[in-house]
Amino acid sequence: MIGIGILGCGAHGERYLRHLQAGDVPGGKGVALWRRDQVAAGVQAARHGVRVHARWQELIADPEVDALVIATPPGVHAESILAAALAGKAVLTEKPLAAGLDQALGLAAALPADARVMVAQTLRFNLALNAARELLPDLGEIYRIRIAQRLEPNPNPWQKVPALAGGGSVALTGVHGFDLIRWFAGATPDRVFARIRLLPGHPLETLFEASFEYADRPLLASCEVAKFSASRSTLLELVGTRGQCWVDYLGGRVEWLAGRERRLVAAPGDRPTLPPTLNAFCRWLERGGPNPVPMAEGVEALRMVDAVYRSAALGQAVPVTRD
């Protein structure tokens, strides 16, 4: 049984801990936590039967902690990921990997060669999206990918602080869509044209759209996020030469379109993605093999984030940078 510590046990860290203690992750168990609010941390620790640490460094040093879930704001990920890796602890880190591409590249350069870091790109474990992946051979050549997401504004104060959040809807929500584009297309795009809007009452962007191109194929991929509405919805559309696939990955519904035919392919419903993410992490630590979502995947998503911000600032298409 892998002893897991939760570093940053706010609302999202609490979700991880709740699944661990509910038996949803047979290979892992929560043993300790840290959060900045020590009063709230004490209440959580008592409720879940785990230890609480006054400093995050003490959580990493805890001998019963084999691995850490890092659920702090992105701007402070790098320091704790590096400290955990140097202490020989495995890490499952929330995304984005860091508050910006430079931070992520600096972290990658500083990590020891044997560091075990998995990025919690949780939508890769969404049942509806995995059902859509199984349809890829039936779609023929895919020349269009479209992702759209609508969300309510997030009330967390840190999401309004650029140094902690790394940005608004592009960095915090768009990173999901950017990773999906890469996951379905199999590669990072080469160019992007993006537009961003700061709406009244929101210090960081809550609305953007980004159109991506590939140099080696006529594929157009787009991602748009509206994070200001009193509503919530998601859409992934894959358009191939032999048909289309529509995915509501929030509601858990996959449809196939060909000619005038439209039929339901899968309807797994709204299933939480944290348990399968944690299970994949624990299986990897127990059995070895390929990292389910290597840190390099998190870096590539941040290349797309960085390019979107540069394009929006310049008002023109820009390349997605390579090393």
Image: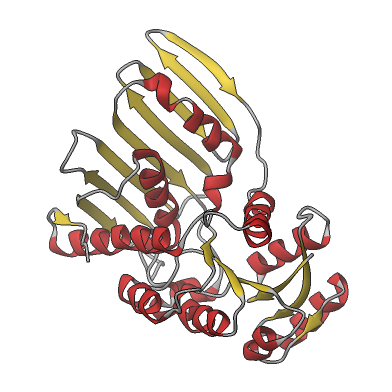
Locate the N terminus and report the quarter of the image it occupies.
bottom right
Q: Quadrant of residue 14?
A: bottom right
Residue at figure coordinates x 15%, y 57% from the top left: 318
Residue 236 visible in the current orientation: yes
Where residue 111 appears, as percent x and y from the top left, is 44, 79
Where residue 77 appears, as percent x and y from the top left, is 49, 77
Is the image coloured rainbow, by chain, by secondary structure, or in one colour? secondary structure
Residue lying farthest to the top in this orientation: 260
Q: Quadrant of residue 278?
A: bottom right
Where residue 138 appears, as percent x and y from the top left, is 42, 19
Residue 231 visible in the current orientation: no
Looking at the image, is 40 positioned above or below residue 11? Answer: below
* Relative to 169, 230 lies left or right: right
Looking at the image, is 306 positioned above or below residue 252? Answer: below
Task: Choose between 293 and 103: the one closer to the eye.
Answer: 293
Where residue 37 appears, as percent x and y from the top left, is 68, 85
Residue at figure coordinates x 12%, y 55% from the top left: 316
* Relative to 59, 101 lies left or right: left
Looking at the image, is 23 positioned above or below residue 109? Answer: above
* Relative to 159, 87 lies left or right: right
Residue at figure coordinates x 32%, y 53% from the top left: 208
Locate the C terminus and report the quarter of the image it occupies.
bottom left
Question: How many numbered marks appear?
Answer: 0
Task: Choose between 305 and 183: the one closer to the eye.
Answer: 183
